[in-house]
Amino acid sequence: MRIKDVNLLGYLFYSAYGFVWGYKMQVSFARSIQSGGRWIWIPPVCLAIFCILYDSSAFHRSMLPDYFWPTSGPDLKGMEMFIVTLPTIGSCFYSLGIILANRTDRTSWDRFLRKLLARP
């Protein structure tokens, strides 16, 4: 497998994992929309923005690629993706799952998701 394929798998895994957990939480605990679960993405996104800006200013070079794909080699370049970016994406999809689960069954897609993810 190439390194780009592994990156895509990481993004897909964290996105799906966050979405399913958010959806399950909203279906299991109907009041989780009121507890601020849909706003849980804000602190990680702010932290990611802070980290990117800090690294760019402290090291006087663009650290942006390290946050989105790791490089192969003996050093730890690209660990930022696993420490900051992927958990941030997971929390964003967690919030999306809560928001979508809170909607009433308006479309066939909503009914399909509710049946698929609401099983114990």
Image: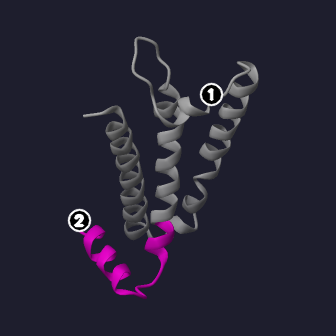
- The amino acid type of the residue labelled 1 equals Met
Q: Secondary structure at mark 1?
A: loop
Quadrant in the rendering for residue 97: bottom left
**Start-end of magenta stretch:** 98-120
For label 2, count other residues whose C-alpha is less than 10 Å away and answer few (under 14), some (14-19) or many (20+): few
- The residue identified by callout 1 is 63
Closer-to-camera residue (42/78): 78
- The residue identified by callout 2 is 120
Q: Is residue 79 left or right of residue 42?
A: left
Closer-to-camera residue (30/41): 41
Q: Residue at x 66, y 28 (%)?
A: 62
Quadrant in the rendering for residue 5: top left
Q: Secondary structure at mark 2?
A: loop
Residue 104: percent from left, percent from top: 45, 84
Q: Residue at x 41, y 62 (%)?
A: 25
Closer-to-camera residue (71/16): 71
Residue 1: percent from left, percent from top: 24, 34
For label 1, count other residues whose C-alpha is less than 10 Å away and answer few (under 14), some (14-19) or many (20+): many
Residue 70: percent from left, percent from top: 45, 28
- Mark 2 to mark 1 CA distance (whole Å): 43 Å
| In the rendered image, the vertical position of residue 67 relative to residue 73, given as above or below | below
| In the rendered image, the vertical position of residue 102 relative to residue 80, given as above or below | below
Query: Residue extending furthest bottom?
Result: 106
Q: Residue at x 36, y 63 (%)?
A: 24
Closer-to-camera residue (112/8): 8
- The amino acid type of the residue labelled 2 equals Pro
